[in-house]
Amino acid sequence: MVFLLNRTSRRQPPVLDRVLNLEGRSVPLTVRENARSTRITLRIEPGGRALKMTIPPGIGEREVSSFIERYRGWMTTRIAKLDVHPGLGDGAEILLRGEAHRIHHTGGLRGLTEATVIDGVPVLKVSGLEEHMGRRIVTFLKKEARKDLETLVTRHTKAVGRPANSLTLKDTRSRWGSCSSEGNLSFSWRIVMAPPFVIDYLAAHEVAHLREMNHGPGFWSLCRSLCPDMDNGKKWLKRNGSALHAIDFG
């Protein structure tokens, strides 16, 4: 969200980070000055767990506080829409490759976490102590994510004629993937909750950076050649990505 304002050349006192109370929910707000900014920008971080404000030089505490009060309703409404996940207890649902799976806690202390179908319903069976369910589900999702991404990266690197040096999985909030100049690829394991065409788009996007370390026309042309359904993948992540980040696995 971007808001225009008139700049002032008078130097103001530094603006401090704070925690906002949005109808009973505490949300941290970071405030950063950017010398090139000509306007205040306010961004909701993935998952709705934090807010980030960027301000031009010369903006002081009083103006930032006034801005916050003017847009408090907007922030509250937008964040509330993201806070929809009911948790990961027995009977709740978790996405796997875009398909909702009902979580079934087996009650057994041993056993593998596995996706199966019971009476026509996709189910994720989880054993072990109930307080460890989140950790076990994360381990399972990471394993599935690595399996999918290694297959896709292998296919796409062959197409571009550039090998990847490594593939790592992280739980990043600021980006879904990255590619270093050394050819190291990194992905958020949460992508395995998205539909297959979205996972394919993300893999193609980062592999394309092995040849094009930019987001220019050449990069997007290469990305589209690797993943013809690129546009739908981008749109899905834009609409649903924050909801995946909002899931708390404990």
Image: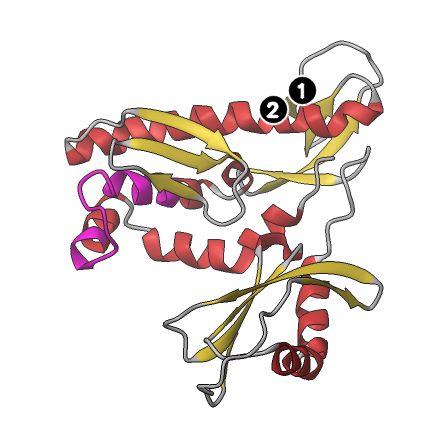
Residue flagged by tag 1: what amino acid is it? Thr
Disc 1 on helix, strand or loop?
A: loop
| Magenta residues, start to end | 200-219
**Circle 1 is placed at which residue position?**
113
Disc 2 crowd, CA 10 A, few/some/many (<14, 14-19, 20+): some
Q: Give the left or right position of residue 36, taking residue 119 as reference.
A: left
As measured in the structure, the alpha-carbon distance from the residue carrying label 1 to the one carrying label 2 is 6 Å
* Residue depicted at 74% across the width and 35% down the height: 250
> Could you say which disc has been placed on residue 96 in the image?
none
Q: Give the left or right position of residue 62, taking residue 55 as reference.
A: right
Q: Earlier in the sequence, mark 1 or mark 2?
A: 1
Instruction: Give the camera-side residue of 205 and 96.
Output: 205
| Extreme residue in the bottom direction | 6
**Circle 2 is placed at which residue position?**
140
Disc 1 crowd, CA 10 A, few/some/many (<14, 14-19, 20+): many
Q: Give the left or right position of residue 88, taking residue 150 as reference.
A: right
**Magenta: predominant secondary structure element?**
helix
Disc 2 on helix, strand or loop?
A: helix
Q: Pointer 1 and pointer 2: residues touching (CB < 8 Å)?
A: yes
* Residue 120 drawn at (x, y percent): 68, 33
Vertical arrangement, residue 29 with respect to residue 196, above or below:
below
* Residue depicted at 67% across the width and 71% down the height: 75
